[in-house]
Image (tube, rainbow, N blue to C red):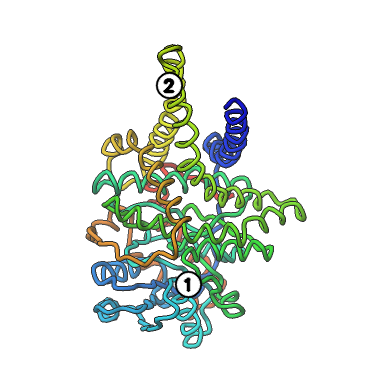
C-alpha cells in the first residue's frame, strides 16, 4: 500500500508541474497588465477591403449584422460586405441580400465547416474584384466598432498580414452566463493579447475579428478546414515563420451565449478541434522554438497544453484527491486529525489557488476595461464572484470534447439584437462624411493634397473615439 501511495504521489507531482507550467504564462500576463500594446500609425490611404461573414441558418441576426457593417468610418467605395450562406435551409441568404450584402450560396454536404466556407467565398470574391487588398472576418452575430476597418487598415499599411482584433461583448449584461462568458474573452484581450503585443509575441487568431492579407489568399486560399479553423490557420502561419499580430483598437462585439448548454456545446467542439491540433501541431511548435529561439512557439505550445491540462483537472485531480479523502475517512477512527488536516488543506488550496485568483482576475479586468463595457461595471460583480465556476465548466467541456468523436454542429439560439443607431451613437460618430469626401478628392485633386485632407478627417473622427474607448489620448508607438 505504501508503494502504491508513493507511486501516486510521484505521478501527482508530475501532473502538478504540468499544471503550473500551463498556467505560468497567464500569471505573467496578469502581472504585466500595465504594458501598452503595439500601436500603428494612421494609414495614408484607404485600402480595398472585403468583409466576410460566413453564416449557416442565421436568419435571426444576419440582417442586423450586415447593416452594422455599413456603419464603418471608412469610404463606402473601399469596402464590400460579403455573406457566404453555407448549407442554409432558411432565408439567411435572402435577408443578407436585402440588407445590402453580396451573397454567395454554398451547398456541400461533405465539407461543412467555417473554413471551407471562407475558402470558397474569398476565392470567388477575388475573381470578381482582384483589387481587394485584405479581408476581415466576422460571425453572423457580430457588430464591429465603427472604427474597426480604419484601425485594421492602419495595421495593414504598416506591413501586418495577419491580425486579430479586440473581442468585446454586445450582451455582456444579458444574464449571468453571458456576463461570465464575456468576462472570459475580455480577460483574453486585455491581459493576454495586450501583454503579448507589448512583448512582441505572436497571437492566436480568432475567427471573428480576423484580418488576412488578400495576397496570401491569392496564393494559398484559406487553408484551415478543421473545427478550430482559426487556431489551425494561426499554427500553419507560424510554422511557416510568419507573424500574427494584435490590433487592440480594432474592436468588435460578439453575442455571448445566454445558456450554459450553449457554452458547453461550443466548448466541446473547441476541445475536439484543439485536441487534434495539439497532436498535429503542438510538438512541432515546441520543436520550432529549439531551432529558432522564438518565444512565441513556446507560448503557443503552452496554450495547446490546456488540452492535457483539462484532462488532468477533470480526471486525475478527482481520482487522486478523492483517494486521499477516502484514506483520511478510513483513518478517522484512529487518527481524527488526519481528516481535519485534509479538509483544512483542501479549503485553503481551493480558496487561495483557485477561487480567489480567478475572482480577483475577473474583477481586475472589469475595472481596467470599464470604459469599454456596454454596461455599468457594478452589473458584473456577481458574475465575477461566480467566474471560477465558469472556469470549471470550461475545463470540463473541453475535456469532454477531447474524449468525444467528432461532435455535430448545433445551432445556438440568438436572443439579442441591438438598435444600431443607439449602439453607434454610444461608440462615437458612425457617419463621417469627411472621410468619403477625402476619398473622392484622392481621385480628383491628386494624391499629395488629398492625403492631408484624409489625415485631417481621420484626426477629427478618431479624436472623440479615443476618449470613449481608451479613456485617454495616447500617441501611436
Residue 330: numbered disc: 2
Q: Is residue 252 left or right of residue 129?
A: left
Q: Position of residue 122 (x, y in %)?
A: 48, 79
Residue at (42%, 56%) from the top-left corner? 251
Q: In front: 332, or 265?
A: 332
- Camera-side residue of 364 and 269: 269
Q: Is residue 457 visible?
A: no
Residue 447 sits above or below residue 291 on the image? below
Q: Residue lying farthest right? A: 291
Crowd tier of the residue under label 1, counting other residues whose Cα lies within 10 Å: few below 14, some 14–19, many 20 or above: many
- Image position of 175 (left or right of 454): left
What's the distance in space between the residues labelled 1 and 2, CA to CA?
Answer: 54 Å
Which residue sits furthest bottom? Answer: 128
Taking depth in this image into account, of 183 and 436 the one nearest to the observer is 183
Residue receiving disc 1: 115
- Secondary element under disc 1, as helix, strand or loop, is helix
Residue 240 x %, y %? 68, 66
Q: Position of residue 394 (x, y in %)?
A: 41, 47
In this view, 446 is above or below 155: below
Closer to the camera: disc 1 or disc 2? 2
> Which residue is found at the position 44% from the left and 68% from the top?
137
**Image quadrant in which the N terminus is located:** top right
How many other residues sit within 10 Å of disc 2, few (<14), some (14-19) or many (≥20)? some
Amino acid at each position: 500500500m505504501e508503494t502504491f501511495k508513493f507511486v501516486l504521489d510521484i505521478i501527482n507531482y508530475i501532473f502538478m508541474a504540468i499544471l503550473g507550467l500551463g498556467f505560468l504564462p497567464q500569471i505573467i500576463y496578469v502581472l504585466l497588465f500595465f504594458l501598452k500594446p503595439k500601436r500603428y500609425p494612421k494609414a495614408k490611404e484607404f485600402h480595398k477591403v472585403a468583409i466576410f461573414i460566413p453564416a449557416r441558418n442565421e436568419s435571426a441576426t444576419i440582417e442586423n449584422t450586415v447593416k452594422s457593417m455599413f456603419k464603418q468610418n471608412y469610404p463606402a467605395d473601399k469596402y464590400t460586405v460579403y455573406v457566404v450562406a453555407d448549407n442554409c435551409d432558411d432565408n439567411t441568404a435572402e435577408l443578407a441580400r436585402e440588407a445590402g450584402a453580396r451573397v454567395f450560396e454554398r451547398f456541400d454536404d461533405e465539407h461543412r465547416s467555417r473554413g471551407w466556407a471562407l475558402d470558397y467565398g474569398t476565392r470567388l470574391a477575388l475573381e470578381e474584384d482582384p483589387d481587394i487588398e485584405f479581408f476581415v472576418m466576422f460571425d453572423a452575430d457580430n457588430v464591429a466598432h465603427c472604427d474597426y476597418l480604419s484601425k485594421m487598415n492602419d495595421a495593414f499599411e504598416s506591413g501586418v498580414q495577419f491580425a486579430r482584433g479586440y473581442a468585446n461583448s454586445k450582451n455582456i449584461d444579458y444574464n449571468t452566463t453571458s456576463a461570465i462568458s464575456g468576462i472570459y474573452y475580455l480577460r483574453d484581450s486585455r491581459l493576454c493579447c495586450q501583454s503579448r503585443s507589448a512583448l512582441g509575441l505572436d497571437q492566436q487568431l480568432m475567427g471573428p475579428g480576423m484580418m488576412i492579407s488578400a495576397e496570401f489568399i491569392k496564393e494559398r486560399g484559406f487553408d484551415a478546414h478543421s473545427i478550430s479553423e482559426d487556431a489551425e490557420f494561426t499554427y500553419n502561419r507560424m510554422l511557416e515563420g510568419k507573424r500574427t499580430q494584435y490590433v487592440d483598437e480594432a474592436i468588435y462585439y460578439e453575442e455571448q451565449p445566454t445558456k450554459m448548454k450553449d457554452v458547453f456545446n461550443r466548448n466541446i467542439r473547441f476541445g475536439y478541434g484543439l485536441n487534434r491540433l495539439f497532436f498535429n501541431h503542438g510538438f512541432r511548435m515546441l520543436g520550432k522554438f529549439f531551432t529558432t529561439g522564438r518565444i512565441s512557439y513556446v507560448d503557443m505550445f503552452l496554450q495547446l497544453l490546456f488540452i492535457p491540462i483539462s484532462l488532468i483537472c477533470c480526471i486525475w485531480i478527482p481520482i487522486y484527491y478523492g483517494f486521499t479523502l477516502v484514506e483520511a475517512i478510513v483513518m478517522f477512527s484512529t487518527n481524527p486529525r488526519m481528516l481535519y488536516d485534509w479538509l483544512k488543506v483542501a479549503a485553503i488550496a481551493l480558496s487561495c489557488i483557485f477561487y480567489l485568483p480567478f475572482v480577483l482576475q475577473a474583477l481586475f479586468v472589469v475595472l481596467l476595461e470599464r470604459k469599454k463595457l456596454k454596461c455599468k461595471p457594478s452589473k458584473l460583480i456577481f458574475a465575477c464572484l461566480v467566474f471560477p465556476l465558469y472556469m470549471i465548466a470550461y475545463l470540463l467541456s473541453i475535456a469532454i470534447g477531447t474524449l468525444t468523436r467528432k461532435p455535430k454542429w448545433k445551432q445556438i439560439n440568438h436572443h439579442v439584437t441591438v438598435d444600431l443607431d443607439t449602439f453607434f451613437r454610444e461608440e462615437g460618430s458612425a457617419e463621417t462624411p469627411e472621410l468619403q469626401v477625402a476619398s473622392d478628392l484622392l481621385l480628383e485633386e491628386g494624391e499629395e493634397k488629398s492625403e492631408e485632407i484624409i489625415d485631417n478627417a481621420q484626426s477629427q473622427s478618431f479624436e472623440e473615439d479615443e476618449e470613449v474607448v481608451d479613456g485617454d489620448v495616447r500617441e501611436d508607438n
